[in-house]
Every structure is written in C-alpha cells, then in structure tokens.
Image (cartoon, rainbow, N blue to C red):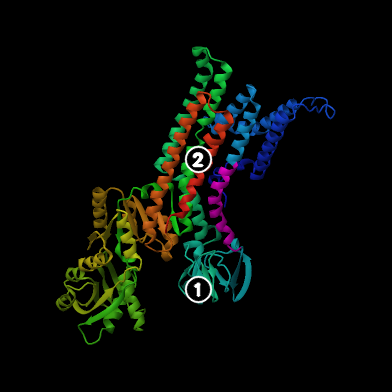
Amino acid sequence: MKTKETSELQGFEHFGGRAWILLAIAFGGTIAVSGLLDVFLGGVRLGFVVPVLNEPATVARMLYLVSIVAGGLIIGFLGLKELVVERRFSVEFLMTVAAFGAAYLGFLFEATTVLFLYTVAEYFEGHIQDRAVKTIEGLSKFIPEKASVITDGSETVVDVKDVRPEMHIIVRPGERIALDGTVTKGYSSVDESLVTGESVPVSKKAGDCVYAGTINSSGLLEVTVSKGSEDTLVSRIARLVVESRKRKASIERFVDRFARVYVPIVIGLAAFSAFAVPELTGGSFSTWLYRSLILLVVSCPSAFVISVPATIFAAVTVAAGKGVLVKGGVYMEKLAKVKAVVFDKTGTLTLGQPVVNDVDSVVKSDERALQYAAALEQFSKHPLAETIVKKAKEENLDYSDLRVEGVEETPGKGVSGFVEGIHVVVGNMELMKQHDCNCEQISETYENEKHTAVCVSMDKTAVASYCVMDDVRRDAAQAVEELKESGIHAVMLTGDKKEIADDIGKKLGIDEVHAELFPEDKLRILSQVKKKYGSVAMVGDGVNDAPALAESDVGIAMGGSKVDVTLESADIVLTRNELSQVPYLIRLGNKTMGVAKQNITASLAVKIVLGGLGLFGLIPLWFTVASGDDGLTLLLLLNTLRLAHVKN
C-alpha cells in the first residue's frame, strides 16, 4: 500500500534505512577514532605499519576526509538534484555547502560532525514520521489473504484478489472477515475495532454490513461480498489518511511559501558575510567564511518546514486510530476555528430509528390502513416511512401483493399514491390539507403533542394516525455540554415539528433550535449561523444532509452502517457513530494548531538567537547542527507526539 506520498515522509529512505544507520555508525566511529588519534596519541608513530601513516594527525585527517566524502556525496547529490530539477535550494544543498566549506578551511572535525549529526537526525526524523504512515499501512496486514468461497454448495479456499462482488464467503468463529459484504445467513458478534476503534463487539445478523479485517467472534456467518479486495473499507481508509497530506492547511502553505523565499535570502546573507564583510571591515576572509557557514547551517528551514506538516499528519493519524477519519490537514485547521456546531436531528442527535409509540384509529380496525400505508411507504427511504413498514411487518401484514400506482413523495411531508385503486395519503397534516383530506379528528388529537404524527387517509378520509417517537443518543447531552464548556454554540436544524424539536433541544441544552425546515431552508439557516458566529461545523448523517455538509466549513458525518458511503460525502467521518467524538475533534484541532504554532515560533526564535551568536563567532559549526536545526527538528517532532494524549 506504499505510495509516493508515504515515501516522501521517510527522510532518507531513498537509500534504505539500514544503509543510513550503518553510515551514521561509520561517521560516529570515524569521528571517535580520529579524535582519539588527534588528541591523545600525538606522540605515537604508526609508520611501522603503513609508511604513509607516519603521524597520528595524518591518520585523523584521512579518516575525516573519508567520512566527509562518504556522506557528502549522497547529501550533495540530493541537494544538487533539487537545485537542478526542481530549481530550489534544499536543506541538503545548504548542508553540503557548509560541510565542504568547513573542510576547505581545515575544520575537518566540524565538517564531519555536520554530516554525521545531519545524517542521524534525518534518519530519526524519517523514523518518527514513518511510524504514523506504517500505522496506516499496517492495516493491510489484518486483511486475510484467502477466503472460503461457496460455489454450487461446495466450499473452496481462494485468494481474496480472485473474489468478486456477489460471491458468497463463509467466515468461521475466530476468523477475520476477508472482504466487505452483507450477512446472508447466521448470527454472530464481530469485533470492528480495526475500523471504528471501539473494542466492544457488535451483533451481526442477516442484512447487516461487515467489513474486511474485522473479527468474527462467535457464530458462523455467510457473507455476500460487496467490494473487491482493492475497494474494501479498510483499504479506502488507509488511502484516505495517506492522501490527506495533499489537502494542506493554510499554515502549511504559508510555511512552504516562506521557505521558498527564505532560503535564497539566507544564501545571499551568507555570501555577503563571506565576501563583502571582510572587504568592508578588513577582517579575515577565513573567519567570516566560517561564520557564514554557521549562518547557513543555523538558517536551514527543515525544522519548521518538516515539523508543521508532520504535526498535522500525526493528528490525522491519531484521529484515525480513534475512529475519526479526517480527509486532510486543512480540516484540522478549520476545526480549530469553529465557533458553532450545527446538528441535524434525525439520525444525528437521535438514533434515527423511530418506533410507533401509539395508534389513534378512526375506524374499528386499523389493519387495512397500516397495510395500505406500508405498501406506499416501502418506496421511501425516510426514517418515518421505514418505521411504518417495520410496524406492518411486526403485525404480520402482507402488502407485497397489493397493486401500487402513481407513488409521489413530497420532501418533508409524506407520500401519496393509489393502492388497489384507492387514493392513499401518508404523511403530516400539511400533506393531508394539500390533498383536501378530512382529518379534523386526528388534528385535534395530536396537534400539541411532542411527537410526530403520521396520518393515513383513504379516499380523502382520515382512517388512522400513528404516534412516532425517536429517542436521543445516550451521549448527545454530554457532547453538547462539552462543546458549550469550550465556548462552542450548539444549533439544531430539523424538518420535524417545532414542539418535538423544542422538546429535544431543551433536553440536550441546545442554544438554538430551528424546526419545520425543508432542505433549502437548512442551507439558508446555516448561512445565517455562519454570519452570526463565524466558522461553522455541520454534523449530519452524511447522505440526506449532503448539501448542508458541503455548505459548512467542516462537514462531519455520522458513519454507522453507511461509513463507506459517507467517506465520499463529508470532510470528516465518525465511524463509531458517537457524538462524543465531536468535542474530541474540536480539542484535537485546537491542540494540533497550538503545537504547530509552537513549533514555528520555537524554530524561528532559536535560529535568530543562534544566527546572531554564530556571526559574532561565539558558537562552533558543529554545535549549530546539534542544536540549531537537526536537534531542534527532533525536539519539535517529539512535541507532536503530545497529540496522542488529547482526551477522548
């Protein structure tokens, strides 16, 4: 699953991690041996071994030069390549100039140390950043390579790459599910922590979705495959996290633009210090050349160029490990600016699984009314329609053989049509009035109650009304409370009745409630909320709320069973389907941008101080590498690890 994007994160993995470790060890050994010979063995002659090695100082210089050439060729090649091909001055170019400049002046220890420290730092930078990438790439290791396919009643074990959609596979207890699909037969509990981060197993029965890499805990399952091996949810999640690096936050783009201008200016200042200052002040050329090399090393922009995208990418990876899929660093930055969170009601603040709580029948028996209503509602995907269909099935009413014609769905109101030649309308009171239905008794009964009334009329006469209620999510109140404690305003938009919306809003502590809205009304209210508060995040189910999610600054979709669909329709997906992840996201976004700004500030401050000290000759060249750039970069990257401790 490795891509070009992942390899860019791996520092000097161009030449292999082990090669760089060996090179770093060789540098360290060279410096140690050279220093010992140079300092402690000044009186020992080695000419009896090799005549040319007549003085320890000669041995030291030769070892220094070998080390400089070995490291300088690789680093210099990378720097020259970026200068010629991409027409920009890279960190490798600056390091090469500094190292060979120091060697030219006779500072062999400093030149070797520059390359040694830079090599070690680059390796560990790549290692720290690569941990995040390997965490995501490692997901593919949990996908079985084989699957048990059922063909003509017989079971055959085949490679998962050869399994196509609509094929049937068998998953035994304790096995990982090989491919995404829908349970056809069987009942079991499945550990979906690989996808959602939640360790509690989820019950699965016929009709439920299952995902590749998750573990079948107990029963035998027969699964109808819905996705090929390259399109499984886990594979798409991995690609999504890696590709999220392409969607840069504005702070990342600022750093990139700054670096393009900054590096040429630094090279110009270094050249001025080396060649112009000695002429103007009468100072020593070698002294000012050495100081200009220090300025080059100190001014290398890798610390803030690398640390900011690494910080944001680390945040995206940490979120993915907790069941939150963020499509790019730009959304992490936007989360830090959010001042209001707008919630859809049905399926977001509530479970989205309303049930019939009470029945008011005008006629003696409502069975025919329910049967005809279900015959119409079976063509609608609205949660209330599904509730009526579910109620009919619970009452063992068969509507499959009824003749249904002219079905027309009115968004936000209901469905109408002809069943066995009878004009049937199922929906709210507005739809009843629109079709001139006589529903006075129903209207008087349910007008002021805090629930949804689904009315049924046959040939313009009311026959029944169903009281439908939808419970709120168990973590909704806590999520809203945490947002408000953070200074975030909570707003609810719904097409439901005002009485119902106000009741739920009061229970959850919602600041603003807007009810009885059509899809276009939601967009209008959302625009008003943005003008009032500024940056706004919208939380919805990812399918019905797609326009509102797109209009918001950050669209957050509840995943649930539709997680593979919502990957395409939102900026952020909550695969656990828990609202408690919303305040967590806000905290993570704030922490991420805080760490990124800390890294930039610390980097520039240290460089300014060390640059000034270097120009006055108060620090040596090797020290600037250890503390001014590579050492600082390592510290800044370690600072990003604090993101893993943001409380969820």
Mark 1 or mark 2, which has the lower sequence index? Answer: 1
Which amino acid is tagged 1? Answer: Ser
575 and 212: which is toward the camera: 575
Which amino acid is tagged 2? Answer: Ile
364 and 291: which is toward the camera: 291
Quarter assignment of residue 545: bottom left
Q: Are marks 1 and 2 in contact (CB under 8 Å)?
A: no
Q: Which residue is mark 1?
A: 189
Give the residue displayed 62% in from the left and 73% down from the top: 155
Decide: is 333 above or below 629: below
Q: Is residue 439 visible?
A: yes
Q: Which residue is mark 2?
A: 306
Question: Can you give x and y, in whole percent of width and height, for residue 128 in the image?
Answer: 55, 47
Question: Can you give x and y, in whole percent of width and height, for residue 8 in the image?
Answer: 55, 43
Quarter assignment of residue 440: bottom left
Q: Residue 143: say if magenta.
A: yes
Q: Which residues are magenta?
A: 123-144
Q: Name the magenta segment's main secondary structure.
A: helix
